[in-house]
Image: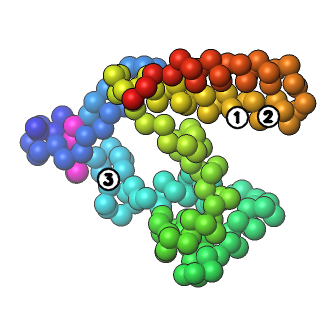
Amino acid sequence: MLCQECGVKPATLHFTKIVNGEKTEFHICESCAREKGELIPGTAGGFSIHSLLSGLLDLEGAGKEKNAAAQTVQGLRCENCGMTYSQFSKLGRFGCSSCYKYFDSTLDPLFRRVHGSTAHVGKLPKRAGAQIMCKRKIDELKQELQQSIADEEFETAAELRDQIRKLEKEMPQE
C-alpha cells in the first residue's frame, strides 16, 4: 500500500481516528508522518511504554503538585529485588514476582483505570457459558448478601439468600 500523502513511498504507519463515532483511516510513510507531526513508534520523540504508564499512573506531574500520598507511593520498595515504585513507573515492568505483593495497593487503581475492573471476566462460550454466568451471578449475590448482613439489613439478606438457593437449584450441570 502506498502513502496516501505522497503516493510514492510505501505506507508504514496506519492510523485510525474515531471522532464522534466517525472512523477515518490514514496510511502514510514515515517522512510524511514527520512532516505532519505525527508520533512515530520506535523513534526519538515517539511513543514509548513509559509514556503510557506514566500517564496511567499520573506520575509525570509536570506543573502538578504532588501530595503526601503520591510521595508515599513513590517511596514504596520491593524488599526482594530493591525496585522502587518510581523505577517501575519508568521501566514499565517489575523486577521480580515479589514486586506484585509490595506494590499491590497501587495496582488495583491502575487495573481499574486500564481494564475497568480488577477481576478478569473474559468471554464466555455460548454453549457452556450458561453455567459460568450462573456461578458468577451466585457469587455476586453472595457478596451482596455479606454486605447486607454487615449493614444489618436482614430482610434484604433473606431475599438474597432465597435467590441464591433458587439459582443453585436451577444451575445447569456440566
Q: Secondary structure at mark 1?
A: helix
| Vertical comparison of 107 with 165: above or below | below
Mark toward the viewer: 3 or 2: 2
Is 2 situated left or right of 128 in this image? left
Q: Which span is picked out in magenta? A: 27-31
Residue 17 or residue 80, whichever sits in front:
80
State yes or no: discs 3 and 2 in contact (Cβ < 8 Å).
Answer: no
Q: Secondary structure at mark 3?
A: loop
Residue 19 appearing in the image: no
Residue in view at x 32 percent, y 33 percent = 16
Q: Find disc 3 in the rendering and name its residue.
A: 40
Residue 132 seen by the camera:
yes
- Seen at 65% across and 76% down, the residue is 77
Type of amino acid under label 1 = Gln
* Mark found first going from the N terminus, 1 or 3: 3
Q: Residue at x 81, y 64 (%)?
A: 68
Q: Between tags 1 and 3, which lies in front?
A: 1
Give the crowd class for mark 3: few <14, some 14-19, many >=20 residues within 10 Å.
some
Disc 2 marks a residue whose amino acid type is Gln
Rendered position, 31 above or below 174: below
Tell me the number on the disc at residue 147. 2
Quadrant for the N terminus, please: top left
Marks 3 and 2, the one that precedes in the sequence:
3
User: Image quadrant of residue 113?
Assistant: top right
Q: Quadrant of residue 165?
A: top right
Indicate the amino acid at tag 3: Ile
Where is residue 35? Give x, y as percent.
30, 48
Q: Identify the residue position indicated by label 1 in the image.
A: 143
